[in-house]
Amino acid sequence: MPVITEIEDLRRLHQKRTPKMFYDYAESGSWTEQTFRENSSDFDLIRLRQRVAVDMSNRSTAATMIGHDVTMPVALAPVGLTGMQRADGEIKAARAAEKFGVPFTLSTMSICSIEDVAEHTTKPFWFQVYTLKDDDFMTRLFQRAKDAKCSAIVITVDLQLLGQRHKDLKNGLSAPPKFTVKSVADMMTKVQWGLEMLGTKRRFFGNIVGHVDGIDDPSSLSAWTAQAFDQSLDWERIKQFRKMWDGPVIIKGILDAEDAKMAANVGADAIVVSNHGGRQLDGALSSIRMLEPILDAVGDKIEVHLDSGIRSGQDVLKALAMGAKGTYIGRAFVNGLGAMGQAGVTRALEVIHKELDSTMALCGERDVKALGRHNLLVPKNFSGEWD
């Protein structure tokens, strides 16, 4: 059994144990991948203030996200095709999150359906919504989330069309995978993955197949997105969605202060500062750079979370100290899932929690809620402003 001390250990195992098309789907960005890289590298520009001779006993990472108690202010982000990283992947990730005490967010583009995850968990999870042209489907989707007792809806607003991801196109990404000489040769080297996939019936987009009329081939993500996603999405339509859900609503994909104000005005309970992990508009600024100007714009009107680029507990601490009330991990938990299944997701959470707790102590803090800019050394030009 390999010794896992950091997320990078899980990433290497994930790459070794999962077919290339699905590993690349998780570990890639759009176009040149500039934003994908800077999401992580910009965290490195923020330094920590070490404090000594302070009482660091009795520490707590407990907090709340949209009123929900959490072991640490970290949620599992919605990630499509999670069930192709490992058989029944969404169920395994949701179970790990539930046991650890952090939110799990199920993607519309999941392999396991809303009903599948609800059946195999005991506590409510969050559900992420992509906006489709089919109004009847959207109405049913919200109702299915209500029936599954989902505790929050996350509306993604930065994917009306799919950013070009070169690796996905070259790999022929699909769910289930299409059998070509290249893909079969690769899958034959991933024996455990293959055996587990043979043992499950969940290999298609569970929230889509059988629920959407007139969709010819939902296996191809790019083709189906171009056909089904609503490119006319605007704030009026988001207001309609807000009225369809009587619980907390989170709007994900905000990267501009003006859009943050609009999200607050339509009645969202929280926003997620995110550039979709660098998978949409390549060349956009990193999420962590845009956090401060967005916070300045909305003040206390709305809870602000951060997604994209978080690979460690130190990244979590930096985001919280910059002012975020919560954070999301996507690739980090998917690395764990692809590496070791449910146990790997648990290990990813353990790694991030330990890094957060230890770093907090060495910064002289005992309570995660007390973190602030006083814990950081931030470059003077580190903001969303650009000449």
Image: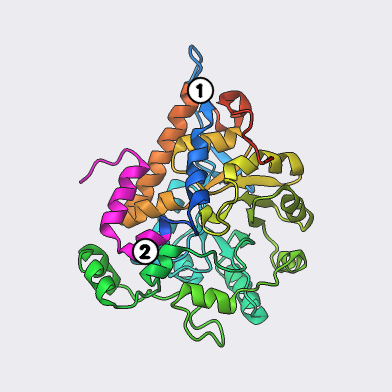
Q: Which quadrant of the view contains residue 94?
A: bottom left
> Is 24 left, or right, of 366 in this rendering?
left
Above or below: residue 299 compared with residue 341 = above
Query: Is residue 86 visible to us here?
Result: no
Q: Nearer the viewer, residue 108 or 20?
A: 20
Image coordinates of residue 260 in percent, x first then y, are: 72, 50
Residue to which mark 2 is pinned? 22
> Is 196 left, or right, of 75 in this rendering?
left
Image quarter hosting the C terminus: top right
Q: Which residues are magenta?
A: 1-25
Q: Tell me which residue sits at (32%, 73%) in the image.
A: 200
Marks 2 and 1, how far apart at CA: 38 Å
Q: Amino acid at mark 2?
A: Phe
Q: Amino acid at mark 1?
A: Cys
Magenta highlight on residue 22: yes
Query: Is residue 186 visible to us here?
Result: yes
The secondary structure that most of the magenta stretch takes on is: helix
Image coordinates of residue 232 in percent, x first then y, are: 70, 72
Residue to which mark 1 is pinned? 363
Q: Nearer the viewer, residue 250 or 378?
A: 378
Magenta highlight on residue 241: no
